[in-house]
């Protein structure tokens, strides 16, 4: 059976953010499935809910599992959701997990500040898109520069999604994850705040910090991130050959 990689995007963006990874894996003959969460991308007209998000991830994972072992790869908000999903008491059919830019507990003052900033951006002309475009233009390589916005930006769902994250029990979920796991952060990522806690809760997980890289590690260093995916796939293959 062929390994399958399921990708979960971050807040505001969509499946399009994974273009570089999907193209890389497809060229190698590996199944690659980038989904859109409710209220994002092709589902922009829907309302974001945690139940809907988990149903979307579960549906994609279980469908992929019919074709081969599953590597779940998720970024930012998608990473937080996928930690909760992978760390369920009844584990889903996930064989390995990469959680990028999401080693933070979304509660308290930190979450409140983030929501306040997001609402402030939404009040700017064009909802601050000119500033977003300027930052992406200056930080991302040409090959991935347009990927984050190619599926549109879910402005209207941002505060709804952020508010919902506060009920996640990531402390319990991280400790429950028993599959090979990698936490991947950029050196300048603002969501590294609980990095040590996450690795203490799950000592078998590996932490990879990419130097001179922001929160957008998947797009800012696409070749490095593809190499991490390669590492995860090789680890899965070794586990299968050993067990067989």
Image (spheres, rainbow, N blue to C red):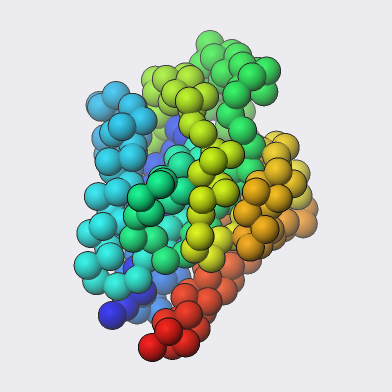
Whether residue 47 is visible, yes or no, is yes
Image quadrant where one finds the N terminus: bottom left
Q: Is residue 15 above or below residue 106?
A: below
**Residue at left offset 33%, top offset 27%:** 49
Specify the quadrant of the image occupied by residue 183: bottom right
Q: Along the line of sight, which residue is nearer the eye, 98 or 121?
A: 98
Q: Is residue 240 above or below residue 141?
A: below
**Residue at left offset 57%, top offset 49%:** 175
Image quadrant where one finds the C terminus: bottom left
Q: Along the line of sight, which residue is nearer the eye, 4 or 152?
A: 4
> Is 140 on the left or on the right of 77, as rendered?
right
On the image, the x and y values in percent for residue 177 come to 51, 54
On the image, the x and y values in percent for residue 64 come to 27, 63
Total numbered circles: 0
On the image, the x and y values in percent for residue 103 come to 63, 43
**Residue at left offset 35%, top offset 55%:** 92
Whether residue 139 is visible, yes or no, is no
> Is 7 on the left or on the right of 175, as rendered?
left
Q: Is residue 235 above or below residue 104?
A: below
On the image, the x and y values in percent for residue 39 come to 32, 30
**Residue at left offset 51%, top offset 50%:** 176
């Amino acid at each position: 059976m062929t390994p399958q990689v399921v990708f979960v995007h971050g807040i505001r963006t969509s499946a399009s953010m994974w273009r570089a990874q999907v193209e890389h894996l497809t060229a190698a003959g590996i199944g690659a499935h980038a989904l859109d969460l409710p209220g994002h991308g092709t589902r922009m007209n829907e309302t974001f809910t945690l139940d809907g998000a988990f149903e979307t991830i579960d549906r994609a994972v279980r469908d992929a599992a019919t074709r081969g072992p599953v590597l779940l790869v998720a970024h930012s908000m998608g990473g937080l959701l996928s930690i909760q999903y992978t760390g369920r008491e009844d584990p889903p059919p996930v064989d390995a997990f990469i959680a990028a830019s999401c080693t933070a507990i979304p509660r308290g003052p930190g979450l409140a500040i983030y929501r306040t900033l997001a609402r402030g951006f939404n009040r700017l002309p064009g909802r601050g898109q000119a500033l977003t475009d300027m930052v992406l233009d200056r930080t991302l390589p040409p090959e991935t520069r347009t990927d984050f916005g190619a599926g549109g930006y879910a402005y209207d769902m941002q505060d709804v999604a952020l508010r919902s994250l506060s009920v996640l029990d990531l402390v319990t979920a991280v400790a429950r994850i028993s599959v090979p796991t990698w936490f991947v952060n950029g050196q300048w990522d603002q969501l590294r705040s609980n990095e040590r806690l996450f690795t203490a809760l799950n000592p078998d997980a590996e932490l990879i910090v990419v130097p001179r890289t922001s929160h957008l590690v998947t797009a800012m260093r696409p070749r490095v991130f593809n190499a991490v995916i390669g590492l995860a796939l090789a680890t899965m293959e070794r586990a299968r050959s050993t067990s067989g």
